[in-house]
Amino acid sequence: MSTPVFSVNGLWKVFGPRADRVPADPELTALPPAELRSRTGCTAAVRDVSFDVRKGEVFVVMGLSGSGKSTLVRCLTRLIEPTAGSIAIDGEDVGAMDRTRLRALRRHRAAMVFQHFGLLPHRTVLDNVAYGLEIQGMGRSERRARAADVVAKVGLDGMERRRPGQLSGGQRQRVGLARALAVDPEVLLFDEPFSALDPLIRRDMQEEVIRLHREEGRTMVFITHDLSEALRLGDRIALMRDGRVVQLGTPEEIVGSPADDYVREFVRDVPREQVLTVRTAMRPQAAGETSGPAVPPTATVSEAIEAVARAGEPARVMEGGRCVGVVDHEVLLDVVAGVAPTAGNRAAGAARVGAAAPRKRGPVSPPPAPTPEAI
Ligand SMILES: Nc1ncnc2c1ncn2[C@@H]1O[C@H](COP(=O)(O)OP(=O)(O)OP(=O)(O)O)[C@@H](O)[C@H]1O
């Protein structure tokens, strides 16, 4: 596997007096946040966090307000100085970088897109987008040509000469995105970029990010407190609580196998059939089950329900020309209802064909009430 873009190990950020004594003292690190604050005056915003961001993935950092998301992501480029632990970008120690290298890191390699776009009000859209290139020292005509390309890429053609005050919130956010893209960074860091936008425009911007990611395969780290946004955008999600990562996994892992009660509660209202795939739901193929619609293992349960309903018979999960399992209305409904597969169902299937891909268990919680905005 290639070197991760970011590799984070044992990272701590403690705010407050004599902060660096906290990570080193097991008695202090064991304290709940409120007690740590009253005993030492310190807040541990990030507590012993480790993860890798892989090349080309959208890595989402999600959690409620105050869980440590912004602090964590700002530590990646040392906009906030970590208290303990290590961070590497492409194997290079970020902690050892001097000011010049840090500046180059932030300008060329890891560009940040903020919620408050930080646009220069007296400059045109084009010049705002070209700004990052200007501080890199690129000549005027070259940077304007490059900026014009990126402006078109984010769907703002025709608006090059407007000033930020003449744009809607969504359009301004596109300018912020274009400015970050213009420097062609290896990784884009998004700090809750869309949380001030109204839901429809927010959806548009999410689509934009998905499209850009699909077209360019650029690595992205995306902060959000919004679960539906995390599920829509993330290849993997780190779910934070009180400075810790309580679960790191794909949307399907987080929704299908919550690590603890906190995560389970967090994902309770997610329409599971839109996140879980047939790989999670399928049972072994029975003898004679050779007809029925074919679905790929990546199809969602929701898509499979449609296929099964249309065909009036179970669907076969096909991978590399081989049937790796079957989904019928019973196993699909199990997922919707949030119940584990029935023992009889599984035993019968297994007895008929033997091994198939293991099926993950869903949480045995009461049926969730899907909310329209949950995904
Ligand atoms: N400069 C600071 N000094 C003291 N405490 C801070 C500082 N910055 C953040 N904190 C505290 O660290 C914790 C994590 O804050 P952080 O902003 O990283 O959370 P967040 O998950 O990004 O929240 P939000 O979604 O509201 O932006 C909070 O308890 C916050 O009050």
Image (spheres, rainbow, N blue to C red):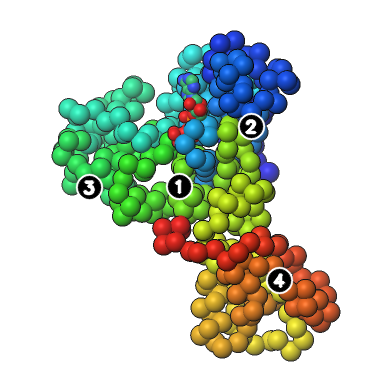
| Mark 3 / mark 1, whichever is N-terminal | 3
Q: How crowded is mark 3: few (under 14 residues within 10 Å), some or many (20 or more)?
A: some
Please determine whether, in this image, residue 99 is positioned above or below residue 365. Answer: above
Closest to the camera, between mark 1 and mark 2, is: 1
Secondary structure at badge 1 equals loop
Queried on whether the Cβ of the residue with tag 1 lies below 8 angstroms from ligand 1, the answer reads no
Q: Name the residue under label 3.
A: 157
| Mark 4 / mark 3, whichever is N-terminal | 3
Q: Mark 1 points at which residue?
A: 226
Distance between the Cα atoms at labels 2 and 3?
A: 42 Å
Distance between the Cα atoms at labels 3 and 1?
A: 30 Å
Task: Verify CB contact (< 8 Å) between mark 4 and mark 2.
Answer: no
| Mark 1 / mark 4, whichever is N-terminal | 1
| Mark 1 / mark 2, whichever is N-terminal | 2
Q: Name the residue under label 2.
A: 49
Secondary structure at badge 3 equals loop
Task: Verify CB contact (< 8 Å) between mark 4 and mark 3.
Answer: no
Task: Verify CB contact (< 8 Å) between mark 1 and mark 2.
Answer: no
Please determine whether, in this image, residue 257 is positioned above or below residue 85. Answer: below
Q: Residues within 10 Å of mark 2 (few under 14, many from 20)?
A: some
Secondary structure at badge 2 equals strand
